[in-house]
Image (tube, rainbow, N blue to C red):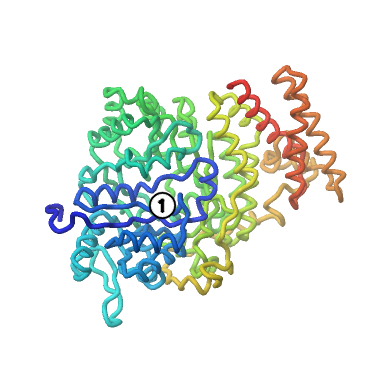
Amino acid sequence: MRGGREGVRGAGVFLVRPHSEAFAAFRGIGGVQPPMNLFGLAAFLRKWGFSVRVLDFEMDGFSEEAFRALLGKEKPILVGVSLSSLNLVETKRICMVAKAAGILAVVGGPHPTAYPRDCLKFTGAWAAVVGEGEETFLELAKLARRGGKGWGKVGGIYYPQARGKGVRFTGTRPPIEDLDSLPFPDRGAEEFRKYSGSLPPGITKRTAYMMASRGCPYSCSFCQSPSLLGRRWRARSVGSFLSEMEEVASLGYGHALIDDDIFGLDPKWLSAFCRGMKEAGLARKMTWTANSRVDLVDEKILRTMKDAGCEKICLGVESGSQRILDGIGKCVKVCQIEQAFRAARRAGIATQAYAIVGHIGETAGDIRKTEELLTRIGPDFIHLSVFAPLPGTRAYDEAVSLGLYEPADNFASHGYFLREAPCGNGVFSAEELVKIRDSIQRRFYLRPAYVLRRLASIRSVQDALYDLKGLAALLFPARGPGGRGRRVDGGKPAEEVLPPVRARPPGHRGIPRHAEDRAPPHPHRPVALPLRALREDPIESRRFHILDIAVLPRARGGAMEALHIFSAFLIVAYLIYVLTGEPGASFLGSVFVFTLGGVNSSGKERRSAGDYVVPALVLFGTFYALLRGI
């Protein structure tokens, strides 16, 4: 399969990433992450003599007319579309345009791997690639070059047979064992320059996105990755990965995000990599970020990583409730989460915690434990998403079998930071889960201690601008297109556009609800409790930060709102004067307060003084840092 390049030179192939509203929030904060899967596939095809063009409609926007004209002008032999569950409708539009132009369109990715037959029926693609795509797509490109006949000889695809004989599966293709055989993506190409503004949370240096391994042996119920890349962990050789690091450094990148599901699962591999970074002098040129698990790191390992240039580590928390952690198959203990974040802090590595609100059967008490845990471990950043049942996962099967989710819904609503959520979790509605998520994020990021820590970490104008973008995204989350009944794709309801998807037999019947832990009447906003109740309930009392006066009686009209704004003005003016020693700062503080007051008071919920004070301090601190930096 790996030998020979006959008959393929000069052939044109388009590789396409469709647009998805699920990543709107990332565009506003850290830019659009390059589709490294497509750039890697492009390098692999070019190695075999194909001319390849990567079209990223996530970055550039999609127009059917412009795409139709481009196909007519360049006449590629094959169009490959990277299909996730989040861009299913957009993928259909792309495939329909290609089909009308008489060009073969092929879909690949996690969604076709989970439901290939339904993808073929809905998108109209000629074939669906399951699992890893490099070798399969190369054979399809060779086939298209020869006229598009002989689909049955290509392993790892589903394709519709002629004369209505149904869909045929050509058999499972084994995963690629020699990952070193895959060429490095061409980061020096002109098409890569538009991604120079793509930054991971907390990083302001030009960032390269890299891959050191594939596969994950764990069985988290919500994760799609094992269905696509397999459960067996495979790593590149340390020498190959260090060579790519050297190339990245030579191109002017100052940071690398190693985007593996689990980086350094093998301690010997990780040790050799860290030693190689130091011996080659790369640890002085490049910093890097990696994903890992809390049960795979300790202070010794993290200090070794820090010495090798590791600036940040991302760890999966998912929940602060041991009941939920056990139910989703995370296979970790809450104490291990706490130990890992303490170890990272002692090692001097920044942390990012991944967590989810709304696991199936998750109650108010479970969610409170998650918020309590996030506050206790104190990560530098949190990635807090609302539960979304993705096809090919156990959570998807459970949600369907329990009647929580209708498979005909639009998958575009499965975003991380959207204002809509795809479904409830059996305890809270979808709308409540979004409000709970937003409320937890605001309380976490607007804590005075966190704000002061972020202000103290500002070292440049870029740092200040990044924090300002993050604050804007926090106060004004992106609105997405999804939700039950929303009209998409030519005005049709989502239920008509998307075909029903057959759920596989569920692994089990979900997580049981605990009667003693029922949800409160309004779980998405602070409840006006008597002060006595707050003193008696330590969990509830810790939900209110020090400047929050939500326990005051609720007044009709704007009297209480005016009191909050006025008290916020006094607090901000005093604190800013203490911080800066400049009398004119109180005037600037009042401007920020009343500006935020006009924005916040337009919402339906009542606000407290804390809702004004801390954002005002963040804005003033950023503005002040910019002035001092300039």
- Residue 338, horizontal then vertical, whole percent: 50, 35
Q: Residue 553 is drawn in which quadrant?
A: top right
| The residue positioned farthest toward the top in the image shown | 581
Up-down: is 314 above or below 137?
above
Q: Residue 471 is drawn in which quadrant?
A: top right
List the residue tagged with mark 1: 56
The secondary structure type at the circle numbered 1 is strand
Up-down: is 298 above or below 72?
above
> Looking at numbered disc 1 in the image, what kind of residue is underneath it?
Asp
Q: Is 441 positioned to the left or the right of 402 in the image?
A: right
- Residue 373, horizontal then vertical, whole percent: 56, 40
Q: In the image, what residue occupies the spot 30% across and 22% down?
A: 281
- Residue 99, horizontal then vertical, whole percent: 35, 70
Looking at the figure, which quarter contains the C terminus? top right
Q: In the image, what residue occupies the spot 50% across and 34% down?
A: 202
Q: In the image, what residue occupies the spot 58% across and 61% down?
A: 424
